[in-house]
Amino acid sequence: MEDEAETHHEDGDGKIGENVSFPFDWMTVQRFRETFPRARWSEERKAWFVPGSTAGRRINRWLAREASRRDPYEDQKGRDAYAFEPILSPYLKVDNNGFRVRTPYSRKIVDELRQVPFAQWQPELKTWRVPFASYDHLHRHWQVIEEEAKRNEPEERRKRAEARKGTEEERVARRRSAERRRRRIPLPADDLPPIGKPISTTSYRIIVITEVTGEIVDPDRVADVYRDVTREHIWGRWRAPNLDELVRTWPSKTEPGTYEVERGWWQPTIEELREARRKARAKERKTGAP
């Protein structure tokens, strides 16, 4: 998959690290805890969280060691299950070491594969590796993976873009793109967000407000882009946050309430920050930023 086999994640407290799951048995858990004494279990994600910026690489080495210890009968069971009920898909290849999964990029696919025990991303090959022993888990997730992969093929994306041509949807999309390029956003005059800090917004996800101009918004001209705008709104200028700002932003412990959504901005949640940090890291890699 392109690009985003992102190995740096954050837990609910905003800490950098990596999630990992694997089939449960006491001996495996004991070896895991000895290798990662700072790891902690997340009941919500049904996975272990290992803190640290190098957690992904350390986990991959541990998984490789564990794979060499696996009961050979587990792999044979997976081979037999595949022979009895094979996954026939252009996105799945089989070799002597297990399965190779290669699809167009989709965050949803990454999330699905991360729930398959011992699945490993190989960035040099842009491929996910899944051992035979995890075939039952892969099979359970495969329908979602394949549907999402087909949806994200370049030709399917092009077809959806063609179908939108000349429609009201396309006209509004063009207006939104033009408005985004202007880097402005309507803000409630009586409840302004903080300047210079990342905030989540209804219109542009996570942004940083750089200036409040004081200019009153004319709702008749922008109502198709900003649905709930009124004459009580004033224009603000914004920019995209950088990775350092996103990492230092403290996440909200709760989802935004009705009031926050209606006013158009709120303190980012951890899920929103995860996605923004992933994109910021990918952008830095592509641009060569330090």
Image: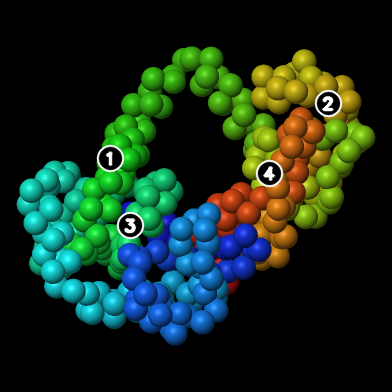
Residue 249, image x, y percentages: 71, 60
Residue 143: mark: 1
The answer to whether marks 4 and 2 mark residues whose Cβ atoms lie closer than 8 Å is: no
Q: For this rendering, which residue is in front, 49 or 268? A: 49
Mark 1: secondary structure = helix
Q: Amino acid at mark 1?
A: Gln
Q: Is residue 147 left or right of residue 169?
A: left
Label 3: few (<14), some or many (≥20) within 10 Å?
many
**Nearer the N terminus, badge 1 or badge 4?**
1
Q: Which residue is rendered at x = 17% and y = 66% of the image? A: 74
**Nearer the N terminus, badge 2 or badge 3?**
3
Mark 2: secondary structure = loop
Residue tagged by mark 4?
255
**Nearer the N terminus, badge 4 or badge 3?**
3
Q: Is residue 234 left or right of residue 142?
A: right
Q: Which residue is rendered at x = 53% and y = 71% of the image? A: 40
Front position among marks 1 and 2: 1
Give the vertical position of 76 relative to 165 (above or below): below
**Nearer the N terminus, badge 4 or badge 2?**
2
Q: Disc 2 versus disc 3: distance between alpha carbons?
A: 49 Å
Q: Disc 1 versus disc 4: distance between alpha carbons?
A: 30 Å
Q: Amino acid at mark 3?
A: Val
**Quadrant location of the N terminus in the rendered image:** bottom left
Label 4: few (<14), some or many (≥20) within 10 Å?
some
Q: Amino acid at mark 4?
A: Glu
Mark 4: secondary structure = loop
**Nearer the N terminus, badge 1 or badge 2?**
1
